[in-house]
Image: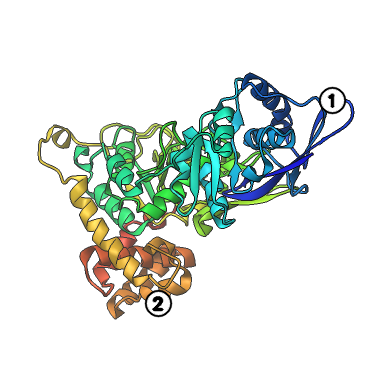
Amino acid sequence: MLARLHSYAVLGMDAYPVEVETDLSRGLPAFSIVGLPDAAVRESRERVRAGMVNSQYEFPLRRITVNLAPADVRKEGPSFDLPIALSLLAASGQLKSESLEAYGAAGELSLDGSVRRINGSLSIAEAASRAKCRGVLLPAANAEEAALIDNIEIIGVESLSQAVEFLKGEAAIAPARVDAPAILSALRSDRLDLADVKGQEHARRALEVCAAGGHNLLMTGPPGSGKTMLARRLPSILPPLDIAEAIEVTRIYSVAGRLNSGSSLIASRPFRSPHHTISHIGLTGGGGTPKPGEVSLSHLGVLFLDELPEFSRLALETLRQPLEDGHVSISRALLSVTYPARFMLVAAMNPCPCGHLGDARQPCICIPQRIASYRSRVSGPLMDRIDVAVEVPGLTKKELLSDRKRESSASVAARVALARKKQLERLAATNAFCNAQMSVGQTERFCRASPAGVRLLDSAIDRLFLSARAHHRILKVSRTIADLEGVTGIEPQHIAEAISYRGMDRRGWDGF
């Protein structure tokens, strides 16, 4: 007897339909799964067998063939356990085949028949919605996450027997429902505040400019000057995620298996801070079964690289493509996947190996050759993709002991929100949503400087030997500064401030 059931497999960020076909035939008892299954799918045979028996169902002693169509795409992961078990029950007559027509299924079975959490359920629900499926049976632990997708019933099941009873009509399970705006509002929490930072007015201003325009930032200064402290407070002044953005970020974490148990929605902008020993695959994604890397986990948020020169050269160079394109493409022999990666890069480093070059409190002990070697670990092309570079000097005793009230994150965030609103209105007809994402043509269209500003920029190009990319980045930062000021035109003072953030161009990156 033959039975069919719809399921779904995750490939990259998306899921695609998989038809689970189960056939029982005469012959010696055997259990075969075909359709390019990986090891986890092949092992479904033992989990399904034990799960059915321990759920008090009869496991058929027949020749069992399970086909996962389409057969030319590799199937990965344990999410086919539940649909295989249900189709096997239908093929053996323990469940009516007609009951499988309206609902798809995905889930991992335990040996006792309970259904475990899986990765990518949000993408699975989205694929089922596109396929006009009435509903999909998913692990109860994934139900609220998948219910973020409208127009489809998400049935959360705790066990194989509960799924069978629902399909037989013997048990009613209400479709999962979530109030995404309420969850988003309740989960938002900015525990860190910019008011905690003492001194560093120039760096605080640079942080505000970067937040307002989505620009990449490099902070250079001695150990203990507050670079990490500043970076960790950047998300507190960024605009909050809207519903669409929160779902987009949640999809990435769901696919990567990084969504915390009991959490159905990522409510805050991501802040990722990988250790400098991370590999280039860990940073940009990949592996035998491609998974999102740190750049994708930072999507719509912040990727903080502390001790920038300590990262491997290969890892840093792989950042250049996602910084420009906003996505990462990973190609393998049998597949190619693309993960989104629109993030703000915030990097911190010491000015020299000992960390005290230019520090008034402690002399530098590094020879010029060591300083040049240290800085050369970060390539010029990567530095060219950083919009704002500022020095973060060590705090003086007066600044450290000061009890002067400092501006809070909420106050700065209000200015940033107004600047972002202007950018959204200006860029409404484009695919960009902040100044940093403008293309060359959009930069030339929206970042026209006044005649005096043009003369100042012309002089800077000659004196600083700016590349074409650096020239356009200065214009974008100038546009952001003007937006923060609430003016339409780009004037010389805006250009001058943007130029002041190109510290590596003023001295030369290999100079000191």
Quadrant for the N terminus in the image: top right
State whether residue 370 appears in this view. no
**Mark toward the start of the polypeptide (2 vs 1):** 1
Q: Which residue lies at the image location 67% right of the left edge and 51% below the top edge?
A: 336
Instruction: Tell me what residue is drawn at x 60 percent, y 20 percent.
Output: 112
Q: Which residue position holds label 1?
A: 29
- Looking at the image, residue 160 sits to the left or right of residue 71; the answer is left
The front one of 86 and 494 is 86
Using the image, determine if residue 2 lies above or below residue 27: below
* Closer to viewer: mark 2 or mark 1: 1
Q: Position of residue 128 (x, y in %)?
A: 57, 51
Q: Secondary structure at mark 2?
A: helix
Q: Amino acid at mark 1?
A: Pro
Q: Position of residue 501 (x, y in %)?
A: 33, 56
Q: Percent from the top left, x then y, of residue 65? A: 80, 36
8 vs 410, left or right, is: right
